Structures are given as structure tokens and as C-alpha cells.
Amino acid sequence: MTLMQRRSLLLGAGALGLGACSSTAMAPPPPTLVRPSLPPMRLSSDRIVRITVCSRPFRPAGPRIEVETVGDKRVVHNYGHGGSGWSLSWGSAELARDLALSGGVRDVAVIGCGAIGMTAATLLQRAGATVTVYASERLPHARSARATGLWTPDSRIADPDRVDPAFPAQWEQMARASWAMHQTYVGQPAEPVAFLDRYGVGGVRAPDPETGFQPQPAAPPVEVRFAGYGSRLAGLTPRSRLLAPDQHDFDAERVRLAPEMQFNIAELSRRLIADFQADGGRIETRTFHAPSELATLRQPVIVNCTGYGARALFGDDSLVPVRGQMAWLPPQPEVRYGFYGNGVSVMSRPDGLGVQRIAGDMFGYGVDDETADVLEAEDAILRAAAVFAA
Ligand SMILES: Cc1cc2nc3c(=O)[nH]c(=O)nc-3n(C[C@H](O)[C@H](O)[C@H](O)COP(=O)(O)OP(=O)(O)OC[C@H]3O[C@@H](n4cnc5c(N)ncnc54)[C@H](O)[C@@H]3O)c2cc1C
């Protein structure tokens, strides 16, 4: 399921959760909520504390998870996770770990210290390997730190016309493994992973949703489709329910609600690195300019988790950047909900209230410019504020 398809579910008659697609789904329980009187979000562009921009590493054929021999090294590629890197990280790491250790080697290098590198390093370490991570930048400075942090396992993950026939099943395996592993971080100090209520807000009434907003950007002329695999996870994730008008605070025609998994990236990053180092893992700052430089590493097995960096390092021109931007407002710990609607996604994390302009999955396709766009940020906040009843 693409982000657009997922939003359609949020806003339409379907259920919010991926489990909505189950043909065996039971009738939803009757709503039991009363008007929640949500703590107000302080949505005002004069409160912006930072704007983060990042490119999703999209590969039409799906993430590259396979072995390549480079000189005398066995390189296990693990990159190209589009808008799903955090969501699929653990499942992808399992596949990479098994490929890396299949020859019996126990001294492994991981290149990359983002979501994909650190989860791969963690699982290799837990399997008994001695692991060293090499990276130009490490979390919280790697690109992964700029993600939204929602469970979006098939956001810009592949083009269904360009994937290997076995890919959908592999995707499902990765998603299910990741879903399970992420839940081991729920309820831990500082909540590295949490479930928060998430509203799908459709048909925003007042003010006129287009008044004063930037016009909807035209979709770029590209010949790709984004795959949607959400139906493969039927029954795994929570389903949404349609709320009655007196059960929500939004000035909108249709509002749906479901709990959604979210990654508190600042804390999750800190935990991944701290746990890895506490178990003896080493992280070295190092930049590789060509595959031939891998020969300088002592380890015979190297797991390549360089994300978009693989385009330059391994010459993978199939990697396409998909730009995304978040405007951040000061944290509001009392706000334990988020929403989609009126062309924006808003989430509350311990490190801030994040507001993102959503203008279709193709928004930002092919754009590798990571410069902040202040007008886009202000527009997103204006749109977000408009969904609440006066
Ligand atoms: C705006 C936005 C929102 C997103 N929201 C979500 C979301 O809600 N949920 C979700 O699951 N995913 C989301 N994503 C996607 C997710 O962020 C990516 O899929 C993920 O970060 C990819 O992780 P990575 O570790 O492969 O790459 P990176 O984080 O880029 O890490 C790559 C690592 O490799 C290193 N490296 C690269 N090249 C070299 C080199 N030549 N030499 C040495 N080191 C090198 C880098 O320094 C870095 O350490 C979002 C992405 C964006 C842009």
C-alpha cells in the first residue's frame, strides 16, 4: 500500500489499519469514545524551531539485499529502502545477517550508521559476530534521523512493475519481522517506539481548505508506480474506526481513528548506538570513495548499508531521491496523538511536533535538493491548524 493508498484508507470508508484489508475481518466494535477534548496543538509558524529535509532512497526494483564479490571481499548489500527504512529495518537486517554469516565468518564490517546499518550491526552482534561500523556520518546526523518516524512499511518501497516476482513475499517477511522486533522497544524508558492515536481527517470544513494555502504542486511526469502491499499484513496491525461528530475535535466531515506505531527517532537512535557499543561494537568515522577501498578493511565480509550513498559509492543509478521535509515546533508532551488531513501529516514526538506537507506520493520525486523550504513549512502549519474546530 502506498502512502496515498494508506491515506485513502484513512480518509475513506475503509479502515485505517493495514488489517482493514482482511477478508475475514470481524465487524468493528461499536465506538466507545466520548468527545476526547484533545490537548491543543500549538500550530503557528512563528514557533518553528527547525526544518529538516531528507531524500528517501527509492529503488524501483525494491531494496537491494544480495551478495556481490568485490575483490576478495564478500559484500552484502542492504540499501534502497525508500520511505520505509525504519519500518522495515529489522526484517531487512535479518536477511542481511543471514547472508553475511552464511560462510562462517564472524568478523564483519558494516558500512553505514543509519537505521539500516545499526539494525544490521545489532543483529550481527547478537548472532555472535564481532562487528565494526564504518560511516561518514552516524546517527543522529545520518539521513535516517530526519525521517518522520511512522510505521510505513510500503512507502515508496518499489515499483510493482519492476520487482522480482519473489519480492512481495520477501517484503511481507521483512515487515512482519520488523513489526515484532519494534514492539520489544515499546514501553521502555523514553519510549523509543510507541503507539499513539492517529486520526484520519477527511473533508475539512472551515476555513475553505484552499484559501490562503499554496496551490497543490503538479505531480512530476515520471513513469513509476509505487507498490502497495498492505493487504499482505491483514490482521497484523490495528484497524481504524469511524468516529461520530461528537467523538472528535476536528472540523471535518469524516474522521477515523486507530493507534499507530511510531518511532521516536532521537531515542531509538540513541538506544541502537548505546546498546551496540555496550556490547563491544565499534563505530569508526570513515568515508569510502570507491569499492576498491573496501580492500583496506580487515574484515572479509562487509555489509553495505549506505542508503542513498550507494548511488555514488557503487554506481547504482537506479536509486532515485524522493525529497521530504518536516517543520518542527517545540515538543508538547501532553499531545499524544497525530493526524493526516488537509494535505498534511502531523505527529507528536518527544523531540518536537512534526508537520509535513503531503501532496501525493510523487511529491519530491527525483529531487535531491536538501535545502529547507520555509514557505512549504509555513503552508504545512497553516493547513494543519485549519483542521481543528474553532
Ligand atoms: C522526509 C522523510 C520521512 C520519512 N519517514 C519515514 C517513516 O515515517 N517511516 C519509515 O520507516 N521510513 C521513513 N523514511 C525513510 C527512511 O528515513 C529511510 O528509508 C532510511 O533512513 C534509510 O536508512 P539508511 O540507513 O539506509 O540510510 P542513511 O540514514 O542515509 O544511512 C546511510 C549511512 O551510510 C553512510 N554512508 C553513505 N555513503 C557512505 C560512504 N561513501 N562512505 C562511508 N559512509 C557512507 C552515511 O554516512 C550513513 O551513516 C522517511 C524518509 C524521509 C526523507
Image (cartoon, helix red, strand yellow):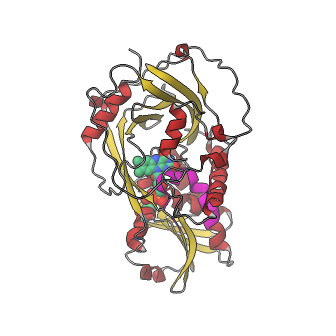
Residue 378 included in the magenta stretch of the image: no
Residue 80 included in the magenta stretch of the image: yes
Q: Across the whole image, how many numbered discs are drawn on residues? A: 0
308 to 139, vertically: above or below = below
Q: Quadrant of the C terminus?
A: top left
Q: Residue at x 63, y 56 (%)?
A: 174
Foreground residue, 227 or 290?
Answer: 227
Viewed as shown, does residue 46 lie left or right of 24? left
Foreground residue, 309 or 324?
Answer: 324
Q: Which contiguous range is marked in magenta?
A: 78-96
Q: Main secondary structure of the magenta part?
A: helix
Residue at the far bottom in the pictured view: 71
348 to 60, vertically: above or below = above
- Where's residue 46, x and y in %? 26, 29
Q: Residue at x 38, y 29 (%)?
A: 384
- Where's residue 340, x and y in %? 46, 33
- Where's residue 66, x and y in %? 58, 72
Quarter of the view holding residue 289: bottom left
Q: Residue at x 72, y 35 (%)?
A: 25
Viewed as shown, does residue 313 lie left or right of 268? left
